[in-house]
Amino acid sequence: MTTLPEVGTNWSELRDRLQKMKQADYAWRVGRVPVFLYHHTEELLRISQEAYIEFFNENGLGRGKAFPSVAKLETEVIEMGIGLLGGGPRAGGTFTSGGTESIFLAIKTARDWARKEKGIDRPKIVMPVSCHPAASKAADYLRMDVVRTPLRPDFSPDIGLLEDAIDERTCMIYASAPGYPHGVFDPIEEIGAIAKNRGFWFHVDACVGGFLAPFVREIGYPIPAFDLSVSGVCSLSADIHKYGFGAKGASLLLFADREYQKYQRFEFSNWPRGTYITDTFQGTRGAGSIASAWAVMNTLGHAGYREIARVIMDAKQRLVEGIEQINGLQIIRPSYLCILLYASNDPRVDIYAVADRMDEMGWYVGKSVTPKAIHIALNPVVARALDDYLTDLAASVAHVRSTNMSE
């Protein structure tokens, strides 16, 4: 068991120890990790880091009075997000620590709204089975029930079954833009119409797509309507620390009408210090990620994000073409944006065995369960490694096939 040392160690030695610890990590800087982090250029990373350090010690809890600079940064980031994601003049939002907190706060807001406006004591959420587990996690914490409904063969939700799951306790419909498992956009306009007609809260989880889909659309790809401009959408979550390229943790929870935020807010007065109010789950929260988001968004602008979108979509096309040339593999369609799945069409090639072989060769590989496949979420740094990836993938398939034939 590690214990606190009696005497401190000098920083140079500690830094060396930190760097040695990282030697066992996958080589993300050369594109061998398609999940968990998002990297474009060393220059953008430096800007993000320097902005973060500039506000390293400031506390977001005190942004109202002690640190008005933090309040200004946060407001501008939220406003840029609202403008990007279809918000009108009544829209509002909150800067959070990540998608999980954004989703938690959206569900908490919907729960308290349903209790107040609809008189539902234990509200229920209906969502496609492909929606992120963070929604069920939040519902579990908040003592809400969740019904997950099946998908069609094309991985889109079966709207008939979704509607069948709605009952008198339903307060919220939750959908994805796109869903992480398959990269498919749920039909946001269709679900929005259902939610509006029946008086339900509708949340769109755009944690993956929020800071990528608008720019993929700008460069000419067909992207379905999914944001706050869609009738019936009440709230939307979008992660800046994903395809917004800000430092972790940075996400936005946006509302079509900022009046909804009164149901999000926590207020407590029964203690000696006085009234305590927060819009987030966290109390004390670092301001570094707020400054990083502000700096990166202002550095890139629409033009910079469009360039990132081009890199990602070009890389996806190259990857599709390369995989289709490998005997024994097939692309699973449809998918949008950055998500790609591929599987085996050769009984001698177990796709999980291919994934394990790729792992042995230094690639971090995601495995999809339904369907059984390899899952990739592309970001710009992965594009630099595609030739090596495809070479090693072909070799891994051949290795697995030859191993099975020899047995």
Image (cartoon, grey):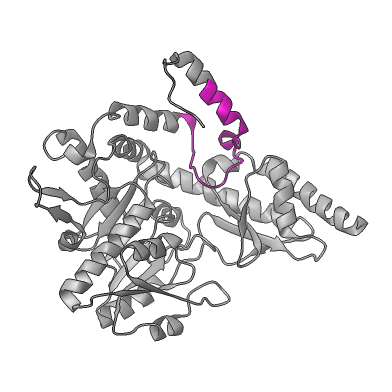
Does the image show residue 53?
Answer: yes
Q: Which residues are magenta?
A: 17-42
Q: Is residue 275 left or right of residue 149?
A: left
Q: Is residue 58 left or right of residue 320?
A: left
Q: How many marks?
A: 0
Quadrant in the picture for residue 202: bottom left
Quadrant in the picture for residue 229: bottom left
Magenta stretch holds residue 32: yes
Residue 127 against residue 238 in the figure, above or below? below
Residue with the most extreme right position: 406
Residue 233 against residue 324 in the figure, above or below? below
- How far across and down, in percent of the image, does residue 158 sit? 48, 80
- How far across and down, in percent of the image, does residue 154 sit? 56, 73
Does the image show residue 228?
Answer: no
Depth order, front residue of 240/400: 400
- The residue under the point 46% across, 43% down is 307
- How far across and down, in percent of the image, does residue 201 sit? 27, 72
Residue 241 against residue 11 in the figure, above or below? below
Quadrant in the picture for residue 23: top right
Magenta stretch holds residue 241: no
- How far across and down, in percent of the image, does residue 110 sit? 25, 67
- The residue under the point 64% across, 40% down is 385
